[in-house]
Image (cartoon, coloured by chain):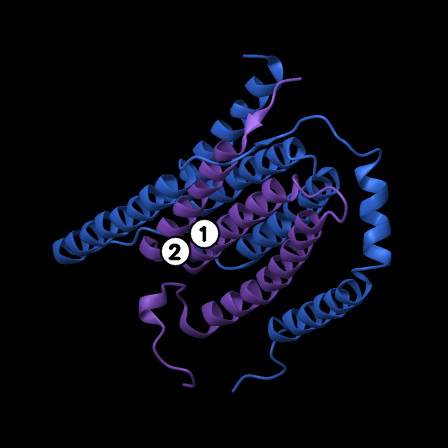
Amino acid sequence: MSVYTLIFYFFGLMMLASALYAVISTNLVRSVFSLFLTFFSVAGILVFTRADYLAISQLMIYVGGILVVLLFGIMLSDKNVLELVGRKGRKAIAASVLNRVLGAGLALLLFAVLACVFLDDGWKSVVSESQQAEPIQSTGFMMMTTYLLPFEMISLLLLMALIGAAYIARKPKHNR
Amino acid sequence: MSTIPLEHFLLMSAALFCIGLYAVLTRRNLVIMLIGIELMVNAGVINLAAFGAFETSHHEGQMMGIFAIVLSAASVAVALAIILKVYQQFNTIEPGKIDTLRN
């Protein structure tokens, strides 16, 4: 096993472990910080598929943008949001345990089905050597030629979404 | 240079997807559910990039991955704004307790 594959599996393990911690942690801030690690590892895995530009934009958008927005949203809101586990009765705890078991069972079932499909023969392996000179160069070229219309549309949609988010989250002018 | 089989990318993204699905199904917190949705989007992006590695002329997988990331960024911004508003209105972000649309 070479260093190349070792780094890949290290990123994969880090991604899954931190994602699991982010999901099962009862502290919202901890799970968001654990999500930093998850998104960083996803960017590392994307590098192994030779999608360099995608990895960079993953780092910039997710780690630099979405997580900061999430943290701001949590920190700016009331501290009661952080207290996830409220005091519950025995019935509610039993219901939540049943809920968790069922949810975990469903997720594991889906994973088993997907794994059965993926472990079927006939997949090629991702080639590590690039047959092409410059993936990033041709990505930029494609973005300005073939994908120009989706590119412009998505920029417009992002602008609309951000204006809409700012409008929704604004302070009300007067109390009802 | 050694190669990594495609199945390993797919299995990893499937596991990430299932973790996100578990969060959406079981957690009683809108922010954690949003995080779960983001994990599922990330799993999809890994799959797109892994399959796109075979297609070297147009980089379609990579382009679709970029569009998916941007779309999920937009959805996170709007969803977080809605969650903050819901919290102001109901004083909780537990989806089971939010049962009215207006007053």
Q: Judge whether residue A22 can be spotted in this image.
A: no
Disc 2: which chain?
Answer: B
- Residue in front for this viewpoint, A67 or A145: A145
Q: Colour of chain B?
A: purple
What amino acid is at disc 2?
A: Val
Mark 1, chain letter?
B
Going from the N terminus, do you reach mark 1 or mark 2 first?
2
Q: Which mark is residue B24?
A: 2
- The foreground one among B9 and A27 is B9
Q: Quadrant of the C terminus of chain B?
A: bottom left
Q: Which residue position is annotated with label 1? A: B36
Q: Say above or below: B97 vs B22.
A: below
Marks 1 & 2 on one chain: yes
| Residue A153 left/right relative to A21 | right
Q: Where does residue A33 sit, x and y in percent of width and height? A: 53, 39
Residue in the image at 55% along x and 45% along y: B47
Q: Position of residue A106 (x, y in %)?
A: 28, 51
Q: CA distance from mark 1 to mark 2?
A: 6 Å
| Colour of the chain lettered A | blue
Check disc 1 and give the amino acid type: Gly
Q: Is residue A101 left or right of residue B9?
A: left
